[in-house]
Image (cartoon, rainbow, N blue to C red):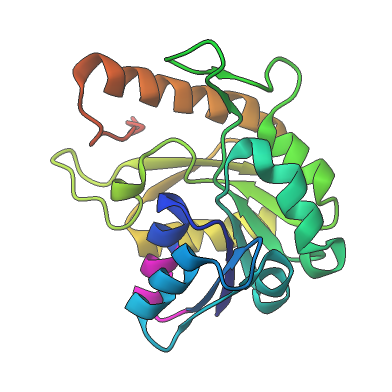
């Protein structure tokens, strides 16, 4: 499968490398086609890795992953191009974190809206699935924790898109809990804040959530 990843930070590089490990082809998109971070990442990953602009990565990918800063989402998705996003599964890993009042952050979008809902509005013809937003990048791929596989909470409006993301998460080593339509991003983004608070209190970031079932 061809995957377009938007973003050159830790999340984008982690997910891109994991997908290559699983045998997929990945183009990392950035504002400039010759982004130094993207070029360095691609050079370390071999023949299945490439780089381009956001629009080129969007056109390349059969599956797309949004892993930029939440505040950058409007500009990134505009640059990607609506025609390149239409009909494709778009995994939204982002959180609209606001550090303007210091640490811990708050959500810049809250109440009766969320970052995930904004992404779906910005890319109305994409099939947006919120995932990977409530864990740190070191545990995103094949997390090995004493309590067993952790739970990735996802949400989105398209059942087939969520099924595809669920299968991919299984390849990544996660259990999956479908939390409903894209409006549930309001709660999954809040879950990110809980993850951050737990890390800040304990000074340790190697944790993930797990849902226990009767």
Residue 170: image location, x then y, percent = 39, 59
Task: Indicate left or right for 206 with 63 as reference.
Answer: left
- The foreground one among 142 and 18 is 18
Q: Residue furthest bottom?
A: 47
Residue 70: image location, x then y, percent = 62, 38
Residue visible at 40% across and 76% down in the picture: 20
Q: Start and end of the magenta stretch?
A: 16-24
Residue 53 picture quarter: bottom right
Q: Quadrant of the N terminus?
A: bottom right
Residue visible at 36% across and 47% down in the picture: 137
Image label count: 0
Report the magenta stretch's main SS.
helix
Q: Is residue 50 above or below residue 106?
A: below
Residue 207: image location, x then y, percent = 26, 33
Residue 33 picture quarter: bottom right
User: In this rendering, does residue 23 appear at all?
Assistant: yes
Q: Is residue 24 above or below residue 107?
A: below
Residue visible at 28% across and 24% down in the picture: 199
Determine if the magenta segment contains residue 23: yes
Task: Indicate left or right for 211 with 120 as reference.
Answer: left
Q: Is residue 106 above or below residue 133?
A: above
User: In this rendering, does residue 180 appear at all?
Assistant: no
Q: Quadrant of the C terminus?
A: top left
Residue visible at 47% across and 25% down in the picture: 191
Residue 183: image location, x then y, percent = 71, 31
Determine if the magenta segment contains residue 44: no
């Amino acid at each position: 499968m061809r995957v377009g990843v938007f973003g050159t930070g830790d999340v984008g590089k982690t997910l891109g490398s994991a997908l290559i490990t699983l045998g997929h082809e990945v183009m990392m998109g950035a504002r400039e086609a010759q982004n130094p971070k993207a070029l360095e990442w691609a050079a370390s990953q071999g023949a299945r890795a490439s780089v381009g602009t956001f629009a080129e990565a969007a056109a390349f990918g059969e599956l797309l992953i949004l892993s930029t800063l939440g505040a950058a989402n409007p500009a990134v998705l505009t640059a990607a191009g609506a025609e390149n996003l239409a009909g494709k599964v778009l995994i939204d890993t982002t959180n609209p974190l606001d550090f303007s009042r210091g640490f811990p952050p708050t959500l810049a979008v809250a109440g009766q809206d969320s970052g995930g809902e904004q992404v779906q509005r910005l890319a109305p013809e994409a099939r947006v699935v919120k995932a990977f937003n409530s864990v740190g990048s070191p545990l995103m791929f094949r997390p090995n924790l004493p309590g067993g596989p952790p739970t990735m909470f996802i949400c989105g409006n398209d059942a087939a898109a969520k099924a595809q993301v669920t299968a991919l998460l299984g390849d990544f080593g996660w259990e999956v809990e479908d939390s409903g339509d894209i409006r549930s991003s309001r709660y999954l983004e809040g879950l990110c804040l809980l993850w951050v608070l737990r890390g800040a209190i304990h000074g340790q970031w190697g944790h993930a959530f797990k849902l226990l079932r009767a």
